């Protein structure tokens, strides 16, 4: 039973290391087929091969650059339906830096029974917020309309059925804080495809596009159509149907991935903020950060106050964990004697150990289960601080001018490592195995190394949480008189 307790505790601590280390250094960056996606049919595979064989259509030499705009939103595109640039007052970073391409989206049309053709639409109607163009050769008509300040509605019609292809183009890039450029889409779950990887699936898509550095450029659909999605090694990402249509309608958007803003936009866009498996807890934590920021407009202070509240709420679990670990530490000499005395009789040793636990009121798993129950909160806090755009350019004080980036002088990771060493010293332990002892001893250093390049907001949270945990432990030990309740 004692070995089970040690193994459980060991698993709890390692889970934290696995979370950060795997996420940052080793986690797979794409999902080849979404969990809820329909399997790729042979028809779709054949269609994909035919559609992508010739590559994207080159713009016509006669294509003209056009633009729409109001106080909130500006779009620059060409008469052959290639998007060049998009600006939005809600967005934080330059469009070109986010998309990584001069022509990040090309809308391509293939009249029924024909190959994709290079369109060159002549202007039929034009104003600051609306443009209508028509291609004389195919009869294709395209309408671009800025409706409000959030997105551009695009509608394409033709006199005969046609196929279409939305062709995104980008380049791979990864920042020091771990933010990586992806082709992303949503089909009941969030999917990331690494730019330049070859992928193929067919599914119903709510939205899709280029996702990078807390921003999203993409398309969204009022009703999720069933499309083939393909990632290509030349850094293209294509969406197209295996069927023909007479009208194509979608919204074009470029936004900062602010959770409240995306929620208001609907169409599942809020899921572009990747909260992971513990999304319910993560949303609660984000709301908590926003609440404290409304009281004190400093996200560093908001992290500290929210960490205090989370520690306060989970204190009953912490209390049980600390008391149980202390009891187990006190009876450890007696357990050792029992193991030595009945080393040749495992059944008798187990029976005597259980009686000892019963007399002392100790539970070999009591110190671990409360910690396991807190893991959803821990993981959710991690996902929020890693994904929340609210921390972009958010200063704390002094040298910490951007909580979404790493600490430039590694002061917080250093303090966090020191606090974790201190917590080891004051935490009761029953670990006697030399190998496990060495692993536990080096864990703060490993954790500090992993955290050095992650957002400073994460280091701040773990540092403050560790200090509060030490304080809670000292309080529990003082309340219990540093001796067992029942022996």
Image (cartoon, helix red, strand yellow):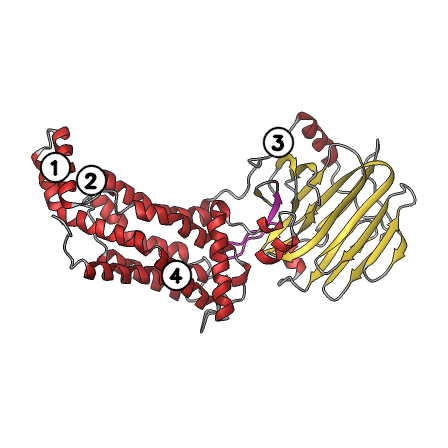
CA distance for labels 1 and 3: 56 Å
Residue 367 location, x and y as percent? Answer: 26, 47
Residue at 69 percent of width and 54 percent of height: 253
Image-quadrant location for residue 366:
top left
Tell me: 10 left or right of 234: left
Residue contact at pointers 2 and 1, CB within 8 angstroms: yes
Residue contact at pointers 1 and 3, CB within 8 angstroms: no
Up the image or down, 398 lies above or below 421; here it is below
Q: Earlier in the sequence, mark 3 or mark 2?
A: 2
Residue under pointer 2? 2
Q: Which residue lies most toward the bottom here?
A: 398
Which element is circle 4 on?
helix
The dominant secondary structure in magenta is loop
Q: Which residue lies most toward the top here?
A: 42
Residue 359 location, x and y as percent? Answer: 13, 43
Q: Earlier in the sequence, mark 1 or mark 4?
A: 4
Q: Earlier in the sequence, mark 2 or mark 1?
A: 2
Up the image or down, 26 lies above or below 242; here it is below
Residue under pointer 4? 309
Label 1: few (<14), some or many (≥20) within 10 Å?
Answer: some
Residue at 80 percent of width and 49 percent of height: 81
CA distance for labels 3 and 2: 47 Å
Residue 89 location, x and y as percent? Answer: 67, 64
The residue segment tinted magenta is 171-187
Quarter of the image with the N terminus is top left
* Residue mark closest to the camera, 2 vs 4: 4
Residue under pointer 1? 339
Residue under pointer 3? 38
């Amino acid at each position: 039973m004692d070995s089970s307790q040690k193994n459980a505790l060991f698993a709890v601590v390692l889970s934290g290391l696995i979370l950060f280390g795997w996420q940052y250094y080793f986690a797979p960056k794409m999902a080849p087929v979404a969990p809820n996606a329909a399997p790729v049919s042979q028809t779709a595979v054949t269609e994909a091969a035919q559609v992508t064989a010739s590559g994207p259509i080159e713009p016509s030499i006669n294509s003209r650059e056009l633009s729409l705009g109001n106080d909130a939103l500006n779009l620059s595109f060409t008469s052959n339906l290639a998007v060049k640039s998009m600006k939005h007052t809600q967005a934080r970073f330059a469009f070109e830096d986010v998309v990584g391409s001069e022509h990040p989206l090309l809308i391509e049309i293939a009249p029924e029974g024909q190959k994709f053709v290079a369109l060159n639409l002549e202007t039929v109607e034009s104003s600051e917020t609306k443009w209508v163009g028509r291609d004389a050769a195919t009869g294709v008509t395209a309408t671009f309309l800025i409706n409000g300040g959030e997105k551009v509605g695009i509608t394409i019609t033709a006199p005969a059925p046609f196929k279409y292809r939305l062709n995104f183009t980008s380049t791979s890039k990864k920042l020091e804080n771990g933010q990586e450029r992806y082709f992303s889409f949503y089909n009941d779950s969030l999917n990331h495809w690494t730019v330049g990887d070859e992928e193929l699936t067919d599914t119903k898509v709510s939205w899709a596009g280029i996702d990078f550095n807390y921003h999203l450029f993409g398309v969204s659909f009022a009703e999720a159509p069933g499309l083939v999605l393909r990632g290509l090694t030349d850094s293209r990402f294509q969406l197209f149907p295996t069927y023909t249509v007479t009208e194509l309608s979608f919204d074009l958007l470029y936004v900062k991935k602010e959770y409240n803003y995306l929620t208001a936009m609907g169409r599942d866009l809020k899921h572009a903020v990747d909260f992971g498996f513990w999304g319910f807890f993560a949303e609660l934590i984000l709301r908590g950060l926003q609440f404290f920021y409304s009281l004190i407009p400093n996200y560093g202070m908001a992290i500290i106050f929210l960490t205090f509240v989370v520690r306060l709420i989970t204190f009953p679990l912490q209390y049980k964990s600390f008391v149980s670990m202390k009891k187990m530490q006190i009876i450890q000499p007696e357990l050792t004697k029992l193991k030595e005395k009945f080393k040749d009789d495992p059944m008798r040793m187990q029976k005597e150990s259980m009686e000892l636990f019963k007399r002392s009121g100790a539970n070999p798993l009591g110190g671990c289960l409360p910690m396991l129950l807190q893991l959803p909160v821990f993981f959710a806090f991690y996902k929020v601080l890693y994904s929340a755009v609210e921390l972009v350019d958010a200063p704390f004080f002094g040298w910490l001018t951007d909580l979404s980036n790493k600490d430039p002088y590694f002061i917080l990771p250093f303090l966090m490592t020191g606090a974790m060493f201190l917590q080891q010293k004051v935490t009761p332990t029953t670990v006697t195995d030399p190998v496990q002892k060495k692993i536990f001893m080096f864990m703060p250093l490993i954790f500090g190394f992993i955290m050095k390049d992650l957002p400073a907001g994460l280091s701040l949270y773990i540092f403050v949480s560790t200090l509060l945990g030490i304080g809670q432990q000292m309080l529990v030990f003082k309340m219990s008189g540093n001796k067992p309740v029942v022996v």
